[in-house]
C-alpha cells in the first residue's frame, strides 16, 4: 500500500509509484484530499500509476481490513500531522486507518518524512513512534533516486507491497 499524505515533496511518492509500476509490483494507493488538490491536473496521471486507488474518505475500503494481505505500507510524503495521527492511533481518514491496521497486523509501516518536518515533530510523539513495533520513520533524501530504495528497503529484500 502507498499513501500520499502531504502537499510537499510529492515527487518522492510519485517516484515510488513509478518504481513499483516499472517493477511489475501491485500497488494500492490512497491520496489525502489536500494532497489531491496540490497535485491538480497531475492527479489523474498519478492515479494511473497505481493498480488500485481508494478514496481517503472510504474507511470501509478493503485495505482497512486486516484480511487484506500486504507486506506493509509506505506513506510518502508524510507530514507532521499524519505522523502524529498515526502514532496516536487516530483513524480520521483511510490513510490513518490503513496505517493503524498495518501496525495491528504486525506489518511494517514506513513513513517518509522530510528532515525539517521530522525535526518539528514534538519529542513525545517521536518517543511514542520509537516504541511502536513495525513503525519506521525514514527521513527523505534530497533526490527521489535515493529516497525510493531507502523506503523499499524497510519492507524487506524484494520490496513487494502486496503479499504473493
Image: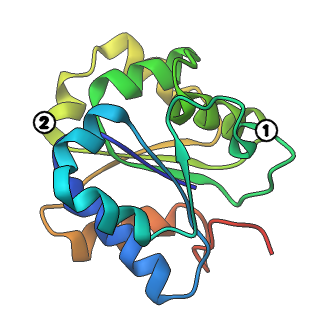
Q: Secondary structure at mark 1?
A: loop
**Which residue lies under the disc numbered 2?**
116
**Which residue lies under the disc numbered 1?**
65
Q: Position of residue 94 (x, y in %)?
A: 56, 32
Q: Quadrant of residue 42?
A: bottom left
**Horizontal side, residue 82 vs residue 65: left or right:** left
Counting the numbered discs, the total is 2
Q: Quadrant of residue 61?
A: top right
How busy is the neighbourhood of tag 2: few (under 14 within 10 Å), some, or many (20 plus)?
few
Q: Residue at x 51, y 35 (%)?
A: 95
**Horizontal side, residue 89 vs residue 146: left or right:** right
Tell me, what colour scheme is on the image?
A: rainbow
Q: Position of residue 157 (x, y in %)?
A: 60, 77
Q: Residue at x 61, y 29 (%)?
A: 97
Q: Position of residue 53 (x, y in %)?
A: 54, 55
Label 1 or label 2, whichever lies nearer to me, is 1
Q: Secondary structure at mark 2?
A: helix
**Horizontal side, residue 146 vs residue 56: left or right:** left
Amino acid at each position: 500500500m502507498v499513501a500520499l499524505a502531504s502537499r510537499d515533496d510529492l515527487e518522492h511518492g510519485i517516484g515510488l509509484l513509478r518504481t513499483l509500476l516499472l517493477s511489475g509490483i501491485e500497488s494500492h494507493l490512497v491520496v489525502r484530499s489536500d494532497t489531491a488538490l496540490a497535485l491538480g491536473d497531475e492527479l489523474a496521471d498519478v492515479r494511473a500509476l497505481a493498480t488500485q486507488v481508494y478514496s481517503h474518505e472510504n474507511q470501509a475500503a478493503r485495505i482497512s481490513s486486516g484480511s487484506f494481505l500486504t507486506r506493509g505500507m509506505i506513506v510518502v510524503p508524510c507530514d507532521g500531522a499524519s505522523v502524529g495521527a498515526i502514532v496516536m492511533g487516530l483513524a480520521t481518514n483511510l490513510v490513518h486507518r490503513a496505517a493503524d491496521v498495518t501496525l495491528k497486523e504486525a506489518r511494517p509501516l514506513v513513513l517518509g518524512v522530510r528532515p525539517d518536518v521530522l525535526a518539528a515533530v514534538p519529542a513525545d510523539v517521536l518517543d511514542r513512534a520509537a516504541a511502536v513495533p513495525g513503525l519506521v520513520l525514514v527521513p527523505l533524501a534530497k533526490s527521489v533516486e535515493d529516497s525510493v530504495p531507502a523506503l523499499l528497503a524497510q519492507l524487506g529484500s524484494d520490496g513487494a507491497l502486496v503479499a504473493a
